[in-house]
């Protein structure tokens, strides 16, 4: 699995309420409508600047806070294809994998806003910035989780006859 896109960079401790504010969910939980409010507390213009295929890049503890699945699905509804971070909150990471959003860990400090990056998720995880010659090793994604991602998430994986045995 290979993703290519523009890096959209955030810092450490981006919590789920920064991704989509709790006050916005009082009106609707429709990801298609909520995507216009993505990261509005950090950057009110962010949602309107997202391009299909962008990749979020963050520091440590991305997705901390409450275990809101909608934080993942709003990212997907905005057209963002994956998240690369130094580390993830456990609940966000599981929600990402279960919903088919690629989430990989690596040292993101050399990546800057707007870099064109390639994320390779196979036996080895690599994040590269070809224009700057960066090649960053990532944390291995277990085979079962790669199969779930390739299926588009846990429900499609199981619906297509996936099994938890290798």
Image (spheres, rainbow, N blue to C red):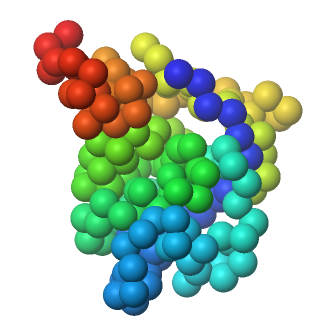
Query: Which image quadrant for residue 22?
Result: bottom left
> Relative to residue 56, is residue 44 depicted above or below?
below
Q: Write the residue at 53% across / 57% down.
A: 77
Does 40 sit left or right of 46 as displayed? left
Does 56 sit left or right of 153 as displayed? right
Residue 97: give x, y in percent of width and height: 34, 40
Residue at the outermost right position: 131
Residue 125: give x, y in percent of width and height: 49, 24
> Relative to residue 11, is residue 2 depicted above or below?
above
Residue at the outermost top position: 166
Residue 150: give x, y in percent of width and height: 42, 25
> Relative to residue 152, is residue 86 depicted above or below?
below
Q: Report if residue 110 is visible in the image.
A: no
Residue 165: give x, y in percent of width and height: 14, 14
Does 104 sit left or right of 135 as displayed? left
Could you tell me which quadrant the C terminus lies in? top left
Q: Report if residue 41 is visible in the image.
A: yes
Q: Nearer the viewer, residue 152 or 109?
A: 152
Q: Write the residue at 77% across / 40% down.
A: 116
Q: Write the residue at 46% across / 65% down.
A: 31
Q: Nearer the viewer, residue 62 or 6?
A: 6
Q: Nearer the viewer, residue 119 or 22?
A: 22
**Total number of numbered labels?**
0
Q: Write the residue at 53% across / 22% down.
A: 1
């Amino acid at each position: 699995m290979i993703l290519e896109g523009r890096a959209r960079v955030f810092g450490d401790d981006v919590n789920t309420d920064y991704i989509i504010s709790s006050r916005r969910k009082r009106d609707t939980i429709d990801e298609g409508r909520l995507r216009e409010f993505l990261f509005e507390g950090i950057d009110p213009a962010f949602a309107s600047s997202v391009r299909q295929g962008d990749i979020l890049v963050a520091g440590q503890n991305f997705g901390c806070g409450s275990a809101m699945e909608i934080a993942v699905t709003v990212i997907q509804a905005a057209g963002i294809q994956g998240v690369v971070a130094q580390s993830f909150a456990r609940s966000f990471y599981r929600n990402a994998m279960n919903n088919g959003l690629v989430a990989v860990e690596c040292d993101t400090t050399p990546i800057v806003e707007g870099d064109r990056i390639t994320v390779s998720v196979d036996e080895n995880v690599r994040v590269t910035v070809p224009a700057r010659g960066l090649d960053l090793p990532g944390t291995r994604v277990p085979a079962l989780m790669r199969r779930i991602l390739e299926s588009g998430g846990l429900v499609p994986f199981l619906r297509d006859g996936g099994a938890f045995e290798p």
